[in-house]
Amino acid sequence: MSGHSKWANIKNKKGKNDAARGKIFTKMARIIAVASREGGPDPEMNAKLREAIAKAKAQNMPNDNIDRAIKKGAGELGNAVYEEVTYEGYGPKGVAVIVSALTDNKNRTAADVRHAFDKYGGNLGTTGCVSYLFDKTGQILIERGDLDEDELMMEMLDAGADDIQTTEEGFEVLTNPNEFLNVVDRLEEMGITPVSASIAQIPTTYTQLVDDDVILMQKMLDMFDDNDDVQEVWHNWEEA
């Protein structure tokens, strides 16, 4: 989705009940713990960990939870060895979908992802089948509030942002992945907590859906969201 629906999707995630938010925090803790184990517990020396922390804070994850995941790291994961895996496929009417997962059992996760695609009118594809339709980009969403638009733009561009787009809901800051953390750090210095902050796959072209296909697509996304292994889903669905 793009435009208004992108903001609506973020707010919908933030407005979920405690059980659903607990699941989000569990996923975030896994990402943080793996990053801490792989690159060390110091965010200043571990860019992957800093990115994970920024993403968790945007989800309003409590600092105590973040610190616990960093400190306990591999200990929280027991003997499990988690791997990052990415799947590509098609949703209803050929919508391009990229699924990022963190799993200790690739066979299980692949079967679950394939099932979600198949159940709702899509199909799992091969590596590279849709990724060429996306650009890897730092994406930060900031609520408008009482922010001074000109000041924010100057600060973001000075920090390394490539583009700032404005909507009724707020601001979308786009960055080169290498500049993402610099922009996040500048926001923190300004006392601004973003609604969302991550290295995202931004579509270069969109596919519109209507009627029953919208329902199928949303159910597919909900099924991915409910899967503990799935960390992020990107797609090029745009509401007609």
Image: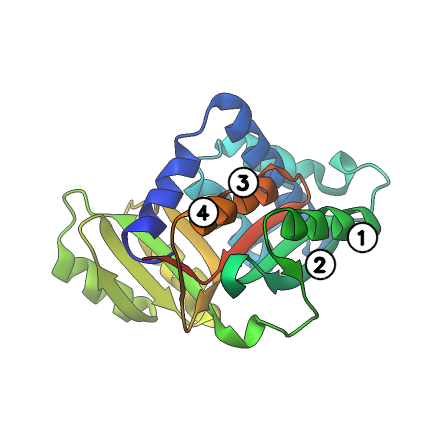
Q: Which mark is residue 167?
A: none
Other-residue count near label 3 (Cα within 10 Å), few / some / many at <14 / 14–19 / ≥20? few
Question: What residue do we see at 35% from left, 39% from top?
Answer: 11
Q: Which residue is mark 1?
A: 106
| Mark 4 or 1: the one toward you | 4
Q: Amino acid at mark 3?
A: Asp
- Of the pair 208 and 19, the residue shown nearer to us: 208
As rendered, which of 126 and 15 lies closer to the eye? 126
Viewer-nearest of discs 2 and 3:
3
Task: Check disc 4 and give the amino acid type.
Answer: Asp
Task: Measure how far apart labels 2 and 1 are at the Cα level.
Answer: 8 Å
How far, Cα to Cα, is label 4 from label 3?
15 Å
Q: Is residue 178 visible?
A: yes
Identify the residue position indicated by label 3 in the image: 222
Task: Work out whether 147 lies above or below 160.
Answer: above
Mark pair 4, 2: CA separation: 30 Å
4 or 2: tag closer to the N-terminus: 2
User: In this view of the protein, which residue sits in the foreground, 16 or 68?
Assistant: 16
Mark 2 or mark 3: name the one nearer the start of the chain: 2
Say if mark 4 contacts mark 1, CB within 8 Å.
no
In percent of width and height, residue 172 lies at 30, 58
- For mark 3, give the secondary structure: helix
> Which labelled disc corresponds to residue 212?
4
Q: CA distance from mark 2 to mark 3?
A: 19 Å
Residue 93 coordinates in the image, percent (x, y): 50, 62
How many C-alpha atoms fall within 10 Å of the one at disc 4: few (<14), some, or many (≥20)? few
Residue behind mark 2: 85
